Image: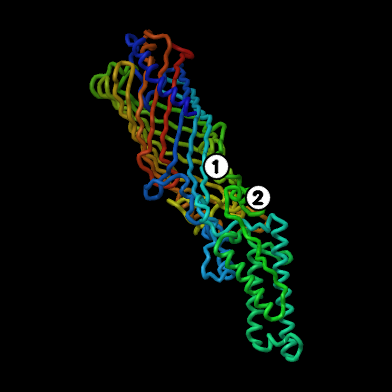
Amino acid sequence: MMVRRSIVLFALPALLAFMITARKAVAQRALGFGDDAAALPVGRMRVSLGALWDRANERYDANGNLRTLGASASASSWNGLFDARLAAASPLASVLSGLGSVDASLGTLAIGRRDASADALLGVELGVLPRLTVGARVHVASHAIEPGVALNTARVEGTMGLNPAWTNTAARDRNALLLTQFDSAIAQTARRITTCQASPSTAGCAPITANVAAAQAVVANATAFANALNSLYGGRKNAVGLPFVPVGTGAAQMAINQRVLGYRDQFAALGNSTIGTQGPAAAALFSPADLTSLLTDSLYGYRLRPLRAVHAYGVGDVNVHLKFRIYQTVGDDTASIRGFAFRQAVGASVRVSGGSLPDASEPFAPVTGSGGSGVSAQSFTDLFYGQRFSMTVVVGVAQSQAQNYAMRVPSASAPTVGGVPFPLVTADREMQLARTPGSQLDIAVTPRFALTGNMWLGASWSFSHQAADTWTTSVLDVTGSGTSSSATADAQTWAAATDWSEQRLALGGTYSTVEATREGRARLAFDVTYEHQQTLTGTGWRVSHLNRDVVTVRWYPQVWGRR
């Protein structure tokens, strides 16, 4: 894609230079860069073919500050703030290890993300009345999101990993044996304490009767320790533990192993040697392979696809539109203008299709269009001064219709970066979402200057603002466990932050033989336009810091009427 774009960008100046040289004597007037208020003559068709390339690796936040696209999916400590099961593991690891406070974390996660698209543009317009032009436009889209994942790069950051007992029989048997040993030692010693209290002279009672309270404390503490082991690692019948347990080389696991040995020694001192020397099965440091397993294996509750380059291909937005010229003080030949001139038109557009919708199972889901149908209305005002200068002001309002799709809505308390929540959300947060976008205002001001009679250069400043969405939700029970209806309130919280504003600057130029053809001085009516767009400012997490290049060729055949 990059090679094709480079070829076009390098070849275009040469093509324009050739056209200027070859047609300079006959070409009259370029239509100009950007939209304008002109209506096609009756019977004249305009067929547009174009290519559009977008690149972005940053987005704006609510304060207008730039953030990398992957910032919301990056964490210096992937801990209980991001997964409730990690939050549940922290107090258990603290109790078992005796270390006070253990931050149950899978480690560092850094995602560098790049978005790119290559769209083909096709449009057909026709002058059906002296002032009325109708047409349709179609985008054929190829959008891609490429995430680069870096996880625990120093190999020491994480305190937790995947519980091996969930997938490994040997680890599961090890935990079961350990809990059996503890439960047996606790039960046997408790009975021995009762016997020794009733008959202190019984053989083997001396260590117990020497300090009954201490022996009872050992049993009570070991019971609490075994219960915590079962809650975290699993081991007893029908107990699987949590999906995350301490890593084998970490301080928490080593402290837990030492406490197992400590209980072994304490029970042995009381005459019971049931507990062995092995602690519970520990986890390996969380790795990229583990990340893939966590996201894709239904055991862990995410049911997402792995982090990888994702492409979306297909038809994007399909629009049907019309433009009606209301008034003008300029004739068809704009080369004859002296002083000021004015032209006004209005337009309306219906988006009959908005391309694909985001896939809830993709952490980063590209789409091929706006996602739904909608309507818009525009005002086009052309201002001319002489033969060299023109300017167009376009003001539009748009309203998209509701879109229905499945979405995973994070908790309202989920960590965010620049207003964007962590994208790895468990399947029990999935709900059916009816999203009604807020109304949108668009303003564009495009001044142009004629370098020659057939070539114009132009610039365009544009401003867009969209109000916040309205989200209506219903919970989908995708896990069989049910989901709290409070997720609906969370969705409304996120919807309130979806308003955005953006300013862009575009630079470009147009070469045209349209006026020359109308005068009978050229055989083929066409124009070629190149523009580069750059986002200047933005607020709201939906605004990317965009670089866009567009090349468009438009052909003007006469279908009927005077040529």
Asked if 536 appears above or below 283 in the picture, the reply is above
Asked if 138 appears above or below 466 in the picture, the reply is above
In the image, 480 versus 288, the foreground residue is: 288
Local crowd size for mark 1, using a 10 Å CA cut-off: few (<14), some (14–19), many (≥20)? some
Local crowd size for mark 2, using a 10 Å CA cut-off: few (<14), some (14–19), many (≥20)? some
Asked if 425 appears above or below 96 in the picture, the reply is above
Give x and y (percent) for residue 323: 43, 27
Give x and y (percent) for residue 558: 46, 13
Asked if 156 appears above or below 275 in the picture, the reply is above
Q: Quadrant of residue 94?
A: bottom right
Q: Which amino acid, mark 2?
A: Asp
Secondary structure under tag 1 reads: loop
Q: How is the image coloured?
A: rainbow
Residue that badge 2 annotates:
297
Residue 35 seen in render: no
Name of the residue lying farthest toward the left = 339
In the image, 55 versus 495, the foreground residue is: 55
